[in-house]
C-alpha cells in the first residue's frame, strides 16, 4: 500500500496542477463573471470552478501550519514580555530612541553606541539567553534558502513585475485604439452615409480590441510557462527542505515559512491566470453597442451591458485596468 503523500508532496502537486491561461480569448470570457463593485463600476471575477478549487486547496493546506506558527509566535512574545531583563531593555530602547516622543531631538551617536552595548550585555546574560522565546534555535536551512531566493534569480517578484507591466502596456494600446476610433467617428459628420461609416469604424474597433485580447493572452501563456519552468526546481528544493524539517521535528514557525514560500509560488501562477482571464475575457466580451451616437461609446461588455464603461471620459494614455469603468482588482495574489 502506497504511503500517504506528505504536505510537502501536496505543495509540489498543487504547483504543478495550476493550468496555463487558455489559448483563446473566447474561452477566457467563459471563465469570468461580474461581481459586485462600488461606484457602479464593472468588477470582474474568475468564476472557473477548477481554478477556484485549486485556490481553496492551497488555502486549506496552508491554514494548519499558519495557525500553529501564529500560536508559537504569540507564546514567545508573551514569554519575552514577562522576562524582567528584556522588559527593562525595552524601556531603555524607548527612552534612548524617544519612541514615545517623536518630536524630540534624535539620540546622539554616543547614545546609540551605548545602547548597542547594553543590548548585547542583556542578551548575553544567562538568565536572558535561556529565557523561553529567545532561545537560539539551530540554523534553519528553510530560512537560509528563503533569504537566498530573495537575492537570486529567478524570483517570483520578477514575474509579477513583468505581468503588471504587460497589463499596463495593453491597457495603453486599448486606450489608443479608442482614441483613434472616436476621433474618426467625430470627423465623419452628418452627411449621407455617415451612420454606415461610423458603424464600420465601430466594427473595426471591436475587432482591434479582440485582436489585442488574443495577443495579451498569448503573452500571458508564454510568461506562465516560463515562470513555471524556471521556478519548479525552486519549489521542489523548498519542498525537500520542508520534508527534512518535518522529519526532524522542527518548529511550526519554520514549517510555516516553507509552506508560505510554496503557497506564494503557486499563487503567482494563479495570479497570471487571473490577470490574463480578466483582461482578455473582458475584451473578448466587448461587442458593438447598438444605436451609439458619434460621441458615445461604440461598444459594451456583453455580460453587463448596463454598466457605463467610461469610454471617451478622459481616455488615459495608459491605465490598468482600462476602460475607466472597470474596477481595479485589489485582491491578494491568487484567485479571489
Image: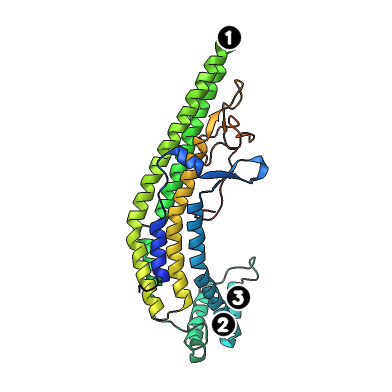
Q: Viewer-nearest of labels 3 and 2?
A: 2
| The image quarter in which residue 287 lies | top right
Label for residue 191?
1
In the image, residue 182 sits, relative to residue 147, either above or below, namely above
Tell me what residue is drawn at x 65 percent, y 71 percent: 100
Q: Position of residue 150 (x, y in %)?
A: 40, 62
In the image, residue 211 sits, relative to residue 165, either above or below, namely above
How far is the residue under mark 1 from the one under mark 2? Answer: 82 Å
Q: Viewer-nearest of labels 1 and 3?
A: 1
Give the labeled residue for mark 2. 80
Q: Residues within 10 Å of mark 3 (few under 14, many from 20)?
A: few
Q: Position of residue 50 (x, y in %)?
A: 48, 53
Give the quarter of the figure containing the N terminus. Answer: bottom left
Q: Position of residue 217 (x, y in %)?
A: 42, 41
Q: Give the SS element for disc 2.
A: helix
Q: Viewer-nearest of labels 1 and 2?
A: 1
Frontmost residue, 239 versus 119: 239
The answer to whether the residue labelled 1 contacts the one labelled 2, judged by CB atoms less than 8 Å apart, is no
Frontmost residue, 212 versus 111: 212
Q: Residues within 10 Å of mark 1 (few under 14, many from 20)?
A: few
Amino acid at each position: 500500500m502506497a504511503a500517504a503523500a506528505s504536505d510537502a508532496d501536496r505543495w509540489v502537486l498543487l504547483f504543478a496542477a495550476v493550468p496555463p491561461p487558455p489559448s483563446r480569448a473566447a474561452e477566457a470570457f467563459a471563465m469570468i463573471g461580474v461581481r459586485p463593485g462600488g461606484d457602479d463600476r464593472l468588477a470582474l471575477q474568475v468564476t472557473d470552478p477548477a481554478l477556484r478549487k485549486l485556490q481553496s486547496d492551497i488555502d486549506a493546506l496552508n491554514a494548519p501550519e499558519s495557525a500553529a506558527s501564529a500560536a508559537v509566535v504569540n507564546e514567545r512574545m508573551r514569554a519575552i514580555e514577562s522576562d524582567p531583563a528584556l522588559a527593562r531593555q525595552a524601556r531603555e530602547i524607548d527612552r534612548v530612541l524617544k519612541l514615545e516622543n517623536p518630536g524630540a531631538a534624535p539620540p546622539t551617536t554616543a547614545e546609540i553606541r551605548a545602547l548597542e552595548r547594553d543590548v548585547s550585555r542583556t542578551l548575553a546574560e544567562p538568565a536572558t539567553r535561556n529565557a523561553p522565546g529567545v532561545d537560539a534555535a539551530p540554523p534553519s536551512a528553510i530560512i537560509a534558502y528563503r533569504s537566498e531566493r530573495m537575492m537570486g534569480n529567478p524570483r517570483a517578484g520578477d514575474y509579477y513585475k513583468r505581468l503588471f507591466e504587460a497589463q499596463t502596456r495593453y491597457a495603453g494600446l486599448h486606450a489608443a485604439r479608442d482614441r483613434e476610433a472616436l476621433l474618426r467617428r467625430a470627423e465623419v459628420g452628418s452627411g449621407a452615409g455617415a451612420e454606415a461609416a461610423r458603424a464600420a469604424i465601430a466594427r473595426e474597433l471591436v475587432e482591434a480590441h479582440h485582436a489585442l485580447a488574443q495577443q495579451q493572452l498569448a503573452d500571458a501563456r508564454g510568461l506562465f510557462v516560463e515562470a513555471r519552468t524556471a521556478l519548479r526546481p525552486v519549489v521542489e528544493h523548498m519542498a525537500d527542505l520542508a520534508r527534512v524539517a518535518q522529519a526532524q521535528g522542527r518548529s511550526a514557525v519554520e514549517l510555516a515559512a516553507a509552506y508560505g514560500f510554496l503557497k506564494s509560488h503557486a499563487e503567482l501562477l494563479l495570479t497570471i491566470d487571473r490577470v490574463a482571464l480578466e483582461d482578455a475575457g473582458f475584451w473578448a466580451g466587448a461587442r458593438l453597442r447598438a444605436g451609439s451616437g458619434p460621441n458615445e461609446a461604440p461598444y459594451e461588455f456583453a455580460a453587463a451591458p448596463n454598466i457605463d464603461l467610461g469610454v471617451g471620459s478622459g481616455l488615459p494614455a495608459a491605465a490598468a485596468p482600462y476602460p475607466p469603468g472597470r474596477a481595479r482588482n485589489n485582491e491578494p495574489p491568487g484567485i479571489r
